[in-house]
């Protein structure tokens, strides 16, 4: 079964990736997230955007 990207209380772990992405975004750097399908790319990006809410501008196209 295919579920949606998770966020907030449903999101777990990814501490290393969250810290690295947050630091990169705060520094104004560009980044590219690549990983096999269904491994949590969208969830990670949405979670970091939620955590940095109010400090960075972000846009979702879907
Ligand atoms: N950090 C997480 N905590 C809990 N569940 C997760 C997490 N990351 C991914 N999942 C689970 O894996 C599924 C796929 O996550 P997600 O849609 O973020 O992956 P994706 O890599 O963006 O997928 P796609 O390749 O289809 O774009 C989610 O529906 C969720 O069930
Ligand atoms: Mg995705």
Image (cartoon, grey):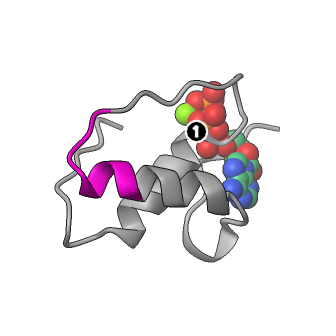
Residue drawn at (41%, 71%) of the image: 51
Above or below, 21 against 42 in this view is below
Q: Relative to residue 24, is residue 29 drawn left or right?
A: left
Residue drawn at (56%, 72%) of the image: 8
Ligand 2 shows up in the quarter that is top right
Label 1 residue SS: helix
Most extreme residue toward the bottom, as rendered? 9
Quick one: 2 or 7, which is closer to the camera?
7
Q: Which residues are magenta?
A: 23-30
The location of residue 42, given as percent across then percent down, is 53, 42
Dividing the picture into quadrants, the one containing residue 12 is bottom right
Verify whether residue 24 appears in magenta: yes
The location of residue 10, given as percent across then percent down, is 68, 69
Residue drawn at (37%, 59%) of the image: 49
Most extreme residue toward the right, as rendered? 1
Above or below, 18 against 53 in this view is above
Q: Relative to residue 33, is residue 25 drawn left or right?
A: left
Verify whether residue 20 appears in magenta: no
Quick one: 20 or 51, which is closer to the camera?
20
Picture quarter with the N terminus: top right
Dividing the picture into quadrants, the one containing residue 56 is bottom left
Quick one: 10 or 31, which is closer to the camera?
31
The 10 Å Cα crowd at callout 1, few under 14, some 14 to 19, many 20 or more, is some
Residue drawn at (24%, 52%) of the image: 27
The location of residue 45, given as percent across then percent down, is 46, 48
- Mark 1 residue CB less than 8 A from any atom of ligand 1: yes
The location of residue 35, given as percent across then percent down, is 65, 26
Picture quarter with the C terminus: top left
Mark 1 lies on residue: 41
Quick one: 53 or 14, which is closer to the camera?
14
Above or below, 13 against 28 in this view is below
């Amino acid at each position: 079964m295919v579920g949606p990207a998770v966020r907030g209380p449903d999101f777990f772990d990814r501490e290393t990736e969250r810290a690295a992405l947050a630091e990169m975004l705060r520094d104004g750097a560009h980044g590219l997230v690549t990983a096999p399908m269904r491994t949590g790319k969208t969830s990670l990006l949405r979670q970091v955007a939620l955590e940095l809410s109010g400090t960075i501008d972000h846009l979702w196209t879907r």
